[in-house]
């Protein structure tokens, strides 16, 4: 599976990348929404982990730019779980919502894999 992780936090990107690669997935990283959108256009990933708050284009803006042309499933992530939840994530066009920080990163990876099966 081809996965794109779009998050401005290096620790989140590194943790997700490590966990996903351990499961045999091909992983690409972007440090902000603008870079992530450009990579999405070229990669056509199966799965996108997308942070809500980032400098430049934020997660909801990236989803809006992808629009109907979006390929792959989107896992929206945010440390501001009070503001965002599964319902608001789906209204924005994401498939699932995951609050940060992650309690069990391998459970997050499994949930994302199940989303694709």
Image (cartoon, helix red, strand yellow):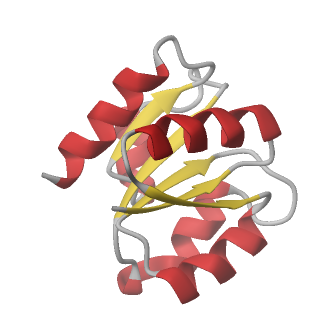
Task: Report x, y in % for residue 113.
Answer: 26, 44
Vertical relation: 98 (above or below) 60: above
- Report the side of 13 relative to 32 (left or right): left
Residue farthest toward the top in the current orientation of the protein: 103
Vertical relation: 107 (above or below) 48: above
Q: Tell me where residue 44 sits by quadrant.
A: bottom left
- Report the side of 44 relative to 6 (left or right): left
Q: Which residue is drawn at 12% across and 52% down?
A: 117
Q: Which residue is drawn at 57% across and 23% down?
A: 81
Task: Report x, y in % for residue 59.
Answer: 63, 56
Which quadrant is home to the N terminus?
Answer: bottom left
Q: Tell me where residue 39 sits by quadrant.
A: bottom right
- Report the side of 23 relative to 4 (left or right): left
Task: Report x, y in % for residue 84.
Answer: 53, 32
Q: Residue at x 81, y 40 (%)?
A: 10
Tell me how many marks there are: 0
Vertical relation: 12 (above or below) 26: above
Residue farthest toward the right in the current orientation of the protein: 55
Task: Report x, y in % for residue 82.
Answer: 58, 20
Q: Residue at x 80, y 47 (%)?
A: 8
Vertical relation: 83 (above or below) 41: above
Q: Tell me where residue 101 sits by quadrant.
A: top right
Of residue 45 and residue 81, the one placed in the foreground of this image is: 45
Of residue 2 and residue 23, the one placed in the foreground of this image is: 23
């Amino acid at each position: 599976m081809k996965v794109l992780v779009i998050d401005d936090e290096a620790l989140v990107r590194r943790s997700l990348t490590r966990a996903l690669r351990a499961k045999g997935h091909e992983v690409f990283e972007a440090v902000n929404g603008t870079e992530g959108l450009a990579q999405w256009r070229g990669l056509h990933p199966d799965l996108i982990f997308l942070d809500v708050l980032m400098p430049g284009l934020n997660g909801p803006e990236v989803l809006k730019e992808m629009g109907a042309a979006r390929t792959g499933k989107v896992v929206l992530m945010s440390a501001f779980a009070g503001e965002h939840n599964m319902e608001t994530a789906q209204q924005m066009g994401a498939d699932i919502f995951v609050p940060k920080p992650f309690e069990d990163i391998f459970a997050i990876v499994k949930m994302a894999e199940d989303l694709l099966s």
